[in-house]
Structures are given as C-alpha cells and as structure tokens.
Amino acid sequence: MTLPVAARIARRELRGGLRGFYVFLACLALGVAAIAAVGSVRESITAGLQREGAVLLGGNAEMSFTYRYAEDAERAWMARTAETVSEIVDFRSMVVVDRDGVTERGLTQVKGVDGAYPLFGQVELDPAVPLADALAGNGAVMERVLADRLGLRPGDTFRLGTGTYEFRAVLTREPDGAGDGFGLGPRLIVRTQALQGSGLLEPGTLFETKYRLALPPVADLPALEAEAEDRFADNGMRWRDARNGAPGMTRFVERLGSFLVLVGLAGLAVGGVGVSAAVRAYLEGKTAVIATLKTLGAESRTILAAYLIQIGALAALGIVIGLVLGALLPLAFAPLIQAQLPVPAEIGIAPGPLAEAALYGVLTALVFTLWPLARTEEVRAGALFRDAVGRTRVWPRPRYLVAILALAGALIGVAAWFSGVPALALWSAFGILAALGVLVLAAVALRWGARRAARARIVRGRTALRLALGAVGGPAGETTSVVLSLGLGLSILAAVGQIDANLRSAISQELPEIAPSYYIVDIQPNQLDGVLDRLQGDAGVSKVQTAPMLRGIITRINGQPAREVAGDHWVVTGDRGVTYAATPPEGTIVNGGEWWPADYDGPPVMSFSDEEAEEIGLKLGDDVTVNILGRDITAKVTSFRDVDFSTAGIGFVIAMNPGALQGAPHTHIATIYAEPQAEAAILRDLASAYPNITAIRVRDAIDRVAEVLDGLAAAIAYGAAATLVTGLIVLIGAAAAGERARVFEAAVLKTVGAVRGQVLAYFALRSALLGAAAGSVAIVAGGVAGWAVMEFVMMGGYAFEPVSALAIVLGGALATLAAGLGFAWRPLAARPARVLRARE
Amino acid sequence: MTDPILSLDDVTLTLAGNAGPVEILHGISLAVNRGETLGLIGPSGSGKSSLLMLMGGLERATGGSVTALGHDLTAMNEDQLARFRRQHMGVVFQSFHLIPTMTALENVATPLELAGHRDAFDRAEEELRAVGLGARIDHYPSQMSGGEQQRVALARAAAPRPHILLADEPTGNLDGANGAAIMDLLFGLRDRHGATLVLVTHAADLAARCDRVVRLADGRVAAQEGRRAAE
Ligand SMILES: Nc1ncnc2c1ncn2[C@@H]1O[C@H](COP(=O)(O)OP(=O)(O)O)[C@@H](O)[C@H]1O
Ligand SMILES: [Mg+2]
C-alpha cells in the first residue's frame, strides 16, 4: 500500500511547481548535455572515419616502404591481389619561386602520384579543373597557404629541386589527407613522372612510397594482411587497410573524445554537489511537513518513497532536458563543427552516446540525492514541537551508505568501461574523490579556524570581519557545500589550465634557447664538404652538427619479430632514423657497455638509446635486425647511451659502426645554430648551390605542432567551459539558497545598529573567505592533477604555471563574491520591520 | 511636568497588502515620557507591532512625524536610523531574532562592537551573567531553550545602555514560568539603567506593572489609562 500513497503525496507536493529546483535541473541537464554532445560528435566522427576508411587511406589497403620503391616480388604480389594499384611517392622538399630578382622558398610535403590517383574519393581544386589536366606535363597543385605565402597564381612557375613546374590550381580537398598523417609542410601534388630529373629522389634521399590497392569486393582484409606481413614485413613493408584508414586520426579522436567525456563527468560531479545541496535545502524546508505526516501515521518508508518519487521525477526531467540539448546542440552547430574537421563526419543523433549520458545522469542523481533523502527517515514527529533550528547532523542508516557507495562504484565502473581509457578514467575518479576528500577536510578546517579566529582578540572591534568569520565557522552555514562545489569546479578548471599552459609552454618557451635554427636534410655525401665550407666560414653561425642519416625499421629482436617482443612501442612501429659513427658524437654519454673502437672493422654493432632500450627490454648482447632499403642488417647491441630528444638537436635511437652502413645509399642531416640575421643568406646560398636539399626552419615546425596543440587546447577549453558554467550555476544556487538567511541577518543587524556599509562588508568578507578557501585547495589540487596528467598521460614535463592557476582561482573567488553580492541587494534594501514581522 | 523622550504626531502607516494598499495606523498621536513604562495593548491585528516598529525606526511612517530624543526619525535615512538605534534604542521581539550563526556572546557583543566599544566582549559577558547565562556564553541559539534565547535577546538589547527599550510581546512564545522570569529581568534592566520602556503585551498582569497603558483598536488609540501619570 505504501507506493500508491507515496505517489499521491509526491504528486501533491509537486503541484507547487519547479521553484527552488532550477539549480537542480540546470546542474543535471548541463552535465548530461555536455557528455551527450561530446559523445555524439565523437560517434559521428568515428563513424565517418570507419565508413570512409578506403577514401581516407586512398585504397582498400596500402603497402608502404621507406627510401625505396617496391621490388619485383612485391609488385607481382600486388598486381596479383588487387584490381588496381596506385603508386605514391611522398617526401619533403622546398618550393622555390624567383620573382623580380627575389627568391622565395617554402617547405612542402610533396606527393608524387600516378594516373590512377585517387583510387577513391575526389580531389577538389580551385579553379575546378580536372586533376588530370592540372597535373598534365609539369603541372602541380598545392594547398592555399603555400600558394599564398609564395604569391603564386595559377599559371606561375616555380622550382622543386632542379625541376621547373607550373602551378595550376589550389588544392582544396585531398581525400586521403587525413590518412597521411601529420606533415610539417603544406601539401603539393605532381606526377611522379615529372619528378624525374629533379634530383629529388636520388638514392639515400628521405622518401616514402605508398602502394594503394583497390581490392575486389570479396577481399578478406585480415587474411591479406597476414599474407603480406608474412612475405614482406621483414623487408620493411608496412601494411594498413581500410578497416582503419586513418589510425592516427581515429586514435586522436577517441582519445580526445574520452578525455572530454571525463571532463564532462567531472562537470557532472560538480553539478552533483549542487544537486545535493538543492535537495538538502528543499527537504530541510519540508521538515515540518515530514513531521506532520509522521504525526498523521505515515511510515518512514512511505515518506522516503514519496520524496524519492518527487526527486526522481525532477531528475528525469533534468536528464531529458540534458539529452535533448546534447542531441540538438551538435546538430545546430553541425556546419561549424564539420568545417573544423579534416575528416568526413555526418553529425546526427547517436543513440549510443545519448544512452551513455543518460546513464551517467541517473547514477549521478542517485549518488548525490540519496544521502539527503535518506535523512528524511531521521526526522521525528517531535520536531514539530521543538525549535526547528535545533536539528543535529545525522548520518543516514548504513544500508543507504552502502547503496550510495555501490552506486558511486557503478558510476566509476561505467565511466571506465565506456571511456575506453579505463586507467585514465579510474585515475580521474580517484582524483575527483581525493579532491572532494581534501575539500571536506578544508571545509572542516575552515570552519574550525574561522570559529577560533572569530573569538580571537584581534578581530574584536572589526565587526564585519568577526561576523564573517562567525558565519563561516558557525552551524547551519553553507560553508561545506560552497567549498565543495566551488572547490571542485575550480580544481578541475585549474587542472585543465595547468595542462593547457604546460602544453603551450612545452613548445613555445623551452626551445628557442637551445634549438637550432634549421635542419637541413637530404645532403648527399658528396655535398657535405661544400655545405660545411659555407657554414664554417660564417661568423653568424655558432654551431653546426652533422650526422649521416638513414631510415630503417626494427624488424627483429634476437630473431623474434620485433612487435612480438616490444609490443606497440613507438620504436618498433614505424621507421626510425639510424646513424653511424666511428667515435661517440660530441656530447654522447655512454652509460652501458662500451662504444666500439674507432678502427672497428668487425660484424655490425649497435649503440641503442638507453631509455627506449629499457622500455622494450633490450639488453647488452641482444641482436637487433634493422631493415634499411629492403636489406636486413643484424647488429649486436654493445652499448647504451643517453639520447636527449627534447633539445631538438640530432637524436638517433640507433647508431651503428660505420662499416655496417657506409655502403648503403644515404644522406646527411645538419643542424645549424645561427643568428637570425645570418639565416636568410645561408639558406639562399645552400639552396641555390644544392637544389636537392631541404631546409626545415625549426620555428616553422614548432609553429605547425603548436597549431595542432592549439586545437587540442581549444577542445579542452570547451569541455572545461561546461564545467565552469555548472560551477557558476551551483555558486548562484548556493547564493540564492542563502538569500533568505541573509535577509534575516541584515534585518537583525540593522536593528542593533549596523549601517548598510557594515552589512555589505560582512557579506563580501564572508563570500571572499569561502572563495579563498575553495581557491587555495583548487590551486593545490589543480597543480597535482595537472602534474599527473602531464607526467603520465602526455609523457611530458611539468612546471607549475602560477599565472594560469592564480587567474582561475581569483576568477573563482571573484565569481563567489559577485554571486554573494548579487544576492545582497534584497537583504540590504529590505526594511527590518517587514522581514522580522514575517518571521513572528 | 512632562518630558517626552518619544513623541508621535498624527502618524499614519499604509502598507501594500494583497488587495491594494491598506492603511494600518490612522493618525496616531502619542508621547512617551523619559523614564516612563508604557504598555501597549489591544486585540491581535490592531497595529501594536506596527506602532512599535515605527518608534524604533524599523518601519517608516507614511504620514506624520516620529521624534525621539529630539531627533525627527522620519527625516533620517536607513543608516542614520541604524546609528541612532545603536546609541539609543534596544529592541526585543517575540521570536527572539538571534543570529543563528553566532554564539550567545557574539550576539550580545555585536551592538556594542557596532557602537565602537573596545571592551564589547567583556561587557557582553557581564550582560549575559546579569541575565543568568554566564555559563552558556559559547552556545549557539540552536543549543538553547526559548527562555534562554530570549534572555540573550534581552542582554543584547540592554547591553549598549539604550535610553529607550522597545519590547514586542517578549513572553509571547514562552511558558508562564519562563515568561515571568523574562519580565522580571526586563523590568530589572529598566530600573538598573533608568531606561524608558515601551512594552507590547497581551497579559493583563504585565500591563498592570506599567506606568501607563495605551489601548489600540483598529489602528487608532482607543483608550489611555494612567497609573502614575496623574501625579
Ligand atoms: N507587511 C504587511 N503588509 C500589509 N499588511 C500588514 C503587513 N504587516 C502587518 N499587516 C497588517 O497590519 C495590521 C496590524 O498588524 P500588527 O501591527 O502586527 O498588529 P498587532 O501587533 O497588534 O497584532 C494587521 O491587520 C496585519 O494584517
Ligand atoms: Mg504583534
């Protein structure tokens, strides 16, 4: 019989409308909406990547090689397997434009294509000429940024190496662009044929070939992959196929999406604190009703059920609002979002992410409302006849505590499961719980400290301060809930701020001091002396380092396939730079084994970077097989050395004795440390003497990385904004909930002789104290969380960024103050008589 | 020879009710002499509280003038009124109106502090001792009984030694024994400090302890009866 009665009570109480529940609804709706929106966008992008896999990859499958074209056996297998094969050559070079005696140069990522390109999708050009026409003869197309930088218009000519080409159209869409991954320069496309005689594809030059295969519809991709790997992997062949056409992009989108969902969950936790406070305030106002119901014979269970139904109905409303918003927002902004994405994404309503967001909403609502709800059981009928203020803090019964813990566990478990990054999710949950724990302690400490301080002699006479301290430390204040919600919101914002600031400074601040101005790659062995001559005579050049450079793929370790030994470690997943040297290059620290004698002339030996060696479990004496230009070279590891990749100097994971590699075609890399004024002349002289070389300005490369990171930071900032808005709503909610109490206090204070300035000062100090306490915790919590994310997720260094932290925390304190003062007008304006009489 | 410390001249009060403005007090003229104890009686809703609020400057008269200690309260702004109360007036309410986030001591010390007394806390402690609460100075209102809370409120009103004490049914929320104790304290304070007291009450025995009693009915002075006024 309990339930129908409870439902009737609930319905009657809900007739009162939504007053007092706007904060509750907004907190829940916002958190759910943020998660649903992020999930929907992520889902449409991954769906797009999946669906368009062949277009993004440029074929149903791709076999790629470093430094070389496919050999006959490989070509034969491809011809046998595929309906059509398209050959792509990919390398870096410099576009050179001579105009009116001035020479302009621009780094570019060149793609040499054949007539079959593109196998899938369409290349789009501006003006909209057919690709075949645009590339006919010496025709070329390039991205707009490059054409603009060099001032090229269709019909103009430019040089690439020693070849001359005609710019015909701007490349506005490259269907396989996202699949190609990250390039340091803008894209340029020419016919591979047209590159003959440009001097750019000489032996030893850094280039990559990709063979895109159009397969028959019945092709069994996993089987073909296994077969190709089996035959050619040891020859340095790498396989990709349309099941995951843009693996880098997919991984990036999934990682970023998960990260944003976690930020959204943190926002939901912030909202949860607001939800909890709203429910508590509502139920406290219901003490008399509950006591009356008990007097009339209602059981505790009935009353709990009645309020559970009410809060449940409101929570359902909040979640539905959130889901509608979360589904509609991405749709509304679809054109904007799509324009920002380098990949095809059809933004639609995705049921999966919506269900996920709803589940988070339900669990959060339960976790945060069960506590205040369970406490209705502790209201005694006698409360009616005693002073209502005389309530003591009571804990809910153990079974409710168990239920709350179980639900919280479920919430964390679900988040870990869905996010796909369980470790990160668990650590985030741990971080949020730890922050909440610290904040509870901080609130207790603040109340204790404020109570003590309010009694201290020095505050006597400073009425506003003493009043503020008394209010913060006194009973029945909102100290705990404000410190919790504001502190958690600020902690999350501070953490995001720390990560963001660290990401940015990692690329913009550290490097200029020590980084070289230019890298020069593709220096042919016979050009090296000439290059060095030019540089060593220059007073503007402070340092030049050169090293022979080859690229190879680690295929085997002690005869075992490298991937089986080292898993997915980056050292074995792609091709790596390899160098050789008779003596340890300047600055090398050998910290395991010994470098080979300068005149060593035995079987190949190798020095491996110590950190990476440890990560893949390499020991001295192990045999490592590296495939270079299709040839296997097996070398014994005889030493480890410390390689610092962070200084942007020349860092090679693998160095070998000269005898092992000298015979292979190779080029040299040089790093130049020069005064900015000397750079232009050096570049001009080297590039005109050796047209085949490519100079990469470090500043440009860093800027290019920075662009990507900027996008990342922006996405994170959007995620954090949802948390911020939730935090503000909670804040305003807390201030609004306190308004009644403020009105009363102001009336009493005026009665005993306080002028408005004193009352206002009291309110301001009170808000400031709460804001400062929450902010101090946030600085520490944000710093720790930022450090953990940078250190363990981004694998970067961490330095505390005081400006970001202080800005966020000051902003938070100011927001608390503003909210507090915003709700001080009514109390200040009200005549004491009206207020006090209403309470008689 | 009379010396009015508080005088009301043709005071009207109109408040905004649910159905338009309601005139609550209709042209009240009344003078309270220095050192006098005036009882305000009358049926519920007759305007006793409103009148008391006007005397304390807690409410603003719609018409007429309220003069206290030679100052025209109707001409003062909120802050001037607050400063005036700080020095000259103590108010006690039926529902005590203590600030819940302050201890007894802090509640009592607040007006003293506002008035700029350096020894506010020591004096507050004395006042609390004087009302028999020396042992409970660190208790919060929620930890005290109604009678105890009203004693704190009395101490708070009396602490700055006001010339005028205004009390609105101070025993209305208390049982008989507690009420009597509060009344004894209130009259004791009046005697000790020589304050003028205006007391709103329902109880006939309390009215009997006043120098003069004014009966209100329907927002007008219906009758006055003096005990010592005729001397
Ligand atoms: N804020 C208000 N607005 C309108 N009418 C009010 C207000 N406060 C009190 N009243 C009315 O004023 C009249 C006098 O009230 P009050 O002074 O409290 O009387 P008493 O103290 O004698 O019981 C009552 O009829 C009451 O309903
Ligand atoms: Mg009254």
Image (tube, helix red, strand yellow):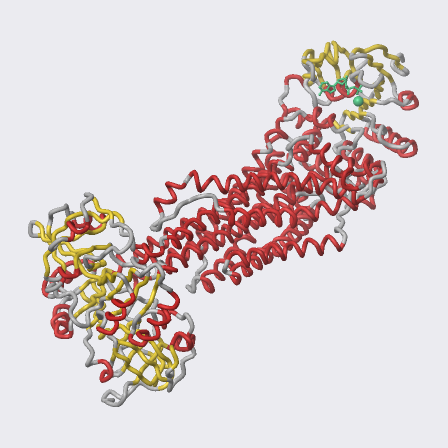
> In the rendered image, which quarter is residue B7 located in?
top right
Question: Does residue A80 appear to the left or right of A491 in the view shown?
Answer: left
Task: Say above or below: A349 vs A669.
Answer: above
Residue in front for this viewpoint, A577 or A544: A577
Residue B75 image point, x, y percent: 64, 17
Q: In which quadrant is the N terminus of chain A drawn?
A: top right
Kindly tell me whether residue A30 is visible in this rendering.
Answer: yes
x and y percentages locating residue A266 in the rendered image: 54, 51
Q: Is residue B130 visible?
A: no
Quadrant of image for the C terminus of chain A: top right
Q: Is residue B57 left or right of residue B166?
A: left
x then y, percent, for residue A313? 66, 39
**Which is more toward the observer, A780 or B166?**
A780
Direction from residue A260 to residue B214 in the image, left or right: right
User: How many labels were placed on the picture?
Assistant: 0
Q: Residue furthest front?
A: A218
Residue at position x 51%, y 49% from top?
A353
Q: Is residue A312 above or below residue A535?
A: above
- Looking at the picture, tell me which residue is in the foreground, A574 or A239: A239
- B44 relative position to A558: left or right: right
Residue A40 appears at what percent x and percent y? Answer: 47, 47
- Quadrant of the rendered image holding ligand 2: top right
